[in-house]
Amino acid sequence: MSQLPQFLSLYRQLIAAPSVSALDPHWDTSNKAVIDLLADWCAQLGFTVTVNPLSTQPNKYNLLASYVPAGSSGGLLLAGHTDTVPWDEGRWSRDPFTLHEGDGKIYGLGAADMKGFFAFVLEALRDIDLKQLKKPLYILATADEETTMAGARELTAFAGLKPDFAVIGEPTSMTPVSSHKGHLTEAIRVTGRSGHSSNPAAGINAIEVMHEVITRLRELQRHFQKTYHNANFAVPYPTLNFGNIHGGDAANRICACCEMHIDLRPLPGMAMTELYGLIDERLAEVNAIYPNSVCLAHMHEPIPGYQCDPEADIVRVAEQLTGNNAEPANYCTEAPFVQALGCNTIIMGPGSIAQAHQPDEYIQVSEVKPALAQLQGLIRSLCLTI
């Protein structure tokens, strides 16, 4: 007999286990405590549990809980990330690691984005007899989604994981999301040659070279708008944003170094090689004038855009169960990596994306029962029938 804790206790223990992922080592925390909780609870329900350490990130882990009826294949994968962003010190009105229920809300770091999803999944399974399943059911918990997406990049380490469908439980207010743009963050670095400002010919001004870079990338912005179009998105073309720039150290010196950070949001279906090729063409034009002065560096590995087949069964079932039509999203998720397993994938979970990364993060108590019923309906529809 399972001794699975009650719903709020599941939630409370998940919130209480810090699992912050951040590029700053001061904030970064192992997710092992969350993985250990999930491993124990999934095993109690009858799942076979596999925990894999990440090859690229020390002290970070992925978990896969599997229930595969004899002779079955395909099935449903319920996926989420175990990490949270850092919290805004001084802006939370309560301890972010202590679940608090009040004002019709459940508060805590990860309550919406997205530790809470695992509490919903486990609670939804409490009343489902796994022995009645006709198709496989998997629960996936990943590491480092909020930074490098390292966990999602190592899913092939789970041998034989080939579900038919996947649901990533990011907070969408139980509205199925079937597409989103990709995300690239790049650093463009210009190396000039310093000298006294009274003689411009004595050096190469990196700020002036960067001006040439910006001019050509502005041309690329216009090219994106004219050439690419996806009417599903409010901004229907790829975007290129100049987000940060710095260079030089004194007004009377020729600037030797200048760096700019850019953010790109490619449309689903755009190949990363195609996108980088377009950028490289523009930078090559500047390097032809100032040899070897400009280089591009990844600030994180690229995340491609994602789109699920709008006619896929998972989309149809999710729309019917929730009464919400599938829609695109502006944010980025692990969906392209999960879908690369060969499964039609949607993003759908309890809580609002407006609460993600916010102080006093919460979900509404009124969301709990409907979301549990909808998750149960999804599992029954896709795993209890052949």
Image (cartoon, rainbow, N blue to C red):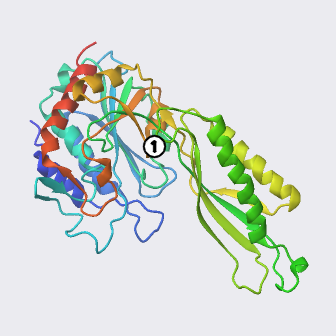
Q: Quadrant of residue 120?
A: top left
Q: Does residue 226 sit above or below 294 in this rendering? A: above
Residue in view at x 71 percent, y 59 percent:
214
Q: Position of residue 204 (x, y in %)?
A: 84, 73
Q: Position of residue 88 (x, y in %)?
A: 33, 69
| Residue 184 in the figure: left or right of residue 54 | right
Quadrant location of the N terminus in the rendered image:
top left
**Residue sitting nearer the eye, 133 or 324:** 324
Quadrant location of the C terminus in the rendered image:
top left
Q: Quadrant of residue 31?
A: bottom left
Q: Position of residue 322 (x, y in %)?
A: 23, 29
Q: Residue furthest top?
A: 386
**Residue sitting nearer the eye, 293 or 386:** 293
**Residue sitting nearer the eye, 9 or 278:** 278
**Residue sitting nearer the eye, 71 or 6:** 6
* One can see residue 278 in this view: yes
Q: Does residue 26 sit above or below 242 in this rendering? A: below
Q: Residue furthest right?
A: 201
Residue in view at x 57 percent, y 40 percent:
237
| Residue 185 in the figure: left or right of residue 356 | right
Q: Does residue 135 sit above or below 158 in this rendering? A: above
Badge 1 marks a residue whose secondary structure is helix
From the image, tell me which residue sits under label 1: 152
Q: Quadrant of residue 166?
A: top left
Q: Amino acid at mark 1?
A: Ala
Q: Position of residue 305 (x, y in %)?
A: 52, 38
| Residue 16 in the figure: left or right of residue 2 | right
Residue in view at x 13 percent, y 35 percent:
126
